[in-house]
Amino acid sequence: MKNLKGIIGLCLVMFSSFVFAQTLSTGKMEVNWTADIVLGKGYTTTQTYTVDNSNFVLCYNATTGKTQIWNLDQGGDPVYDKTTHTGWTSTVFFQLNNKTYLFTYKKASGEVIFFEMSATGISKRVGEHKWSKDWDGFDVLYRDSKPTIMMTRSSDGRAKLFEPHF
């Protein structure tokens, strides 16, 4: 009798999961396009970020080092258009002490550079380090309003978390 109750409970869980999945898959999703921008060819990284309540997009080509930043709220020409270092494989933006920062990483060498951002693009370099190689995933989460960057390495399944301080 105990096994029968367990099997019935399992069936109810499976049925309710199936019904829930069916409900989700039959819902409607609508998309409202707000912009259609031609950024140019060859960018290996594009990421959005905010500075002083304005929205920006960074576009970077790892092969050539071409870096352009546009103010998405104003449009027009890039606010930043320079050729920088080549080979950056990962970038993430984060907020700390009411400032926006860019974290960059080179998978092949382990080089790390932190930049402070401004309304005109990359403002200044605020830190650089040499870390281990081959990290391929980066993301930012906030704990107690402080940024924590999570890095992952697919080759061994390892993950590390760190809090930047300036």
Image (spheres, grey):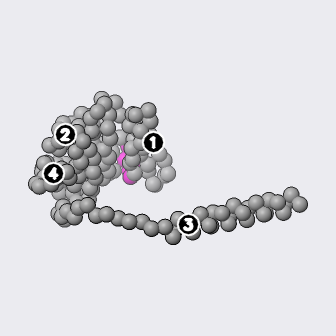
Residue highlighted by disc 2: 118
Which amino acid, mark 3?
Answer: Thr
Q: In the rendered structure, which disc, 2 or 4, sits on the residue that comes first in sequence? A: 4
Alpha carbons under labels 2 and 4: distance apart:
15 Å
Could you tell whether 21 is left or right of 117 in the image? right
Q: Against 95, is 86 above or below?
A: below
Alpha carbons under labels 2 and 1: distance apart:
28 Å
Q: Residue at x 51, y 68 (%)?
A: 25
Q: Which corner quadrant holds the N terminus?
A: bottom right
Q: Which of the labelled discs sits on residue 150, or is there none?
A: none
The answer to whether marks 3 and 4 mark residues whose Cβ atoms lie closer than 8 Å is: no
Q: Residue at x 38, y 52 (%)?
A: 136
Could you tell whether 89 is left or right of 80 in the image? right
Residue highlighted by disc 4: 74
Q: Which of the labelled discs sits on residue 23, or is there none?
A: 3
Name the front one of labels 2 and 4. Answer: 4
Element on which disc 4 rests: loop
Alpha carbons under labels 4 and 1: distance apart:
37 Å
Which amino acid, mark 4?
Answer: Gln
The answer to whether marks 2 and 4 mark residues whose Cβ atoms lie closer than 8 Å is: no
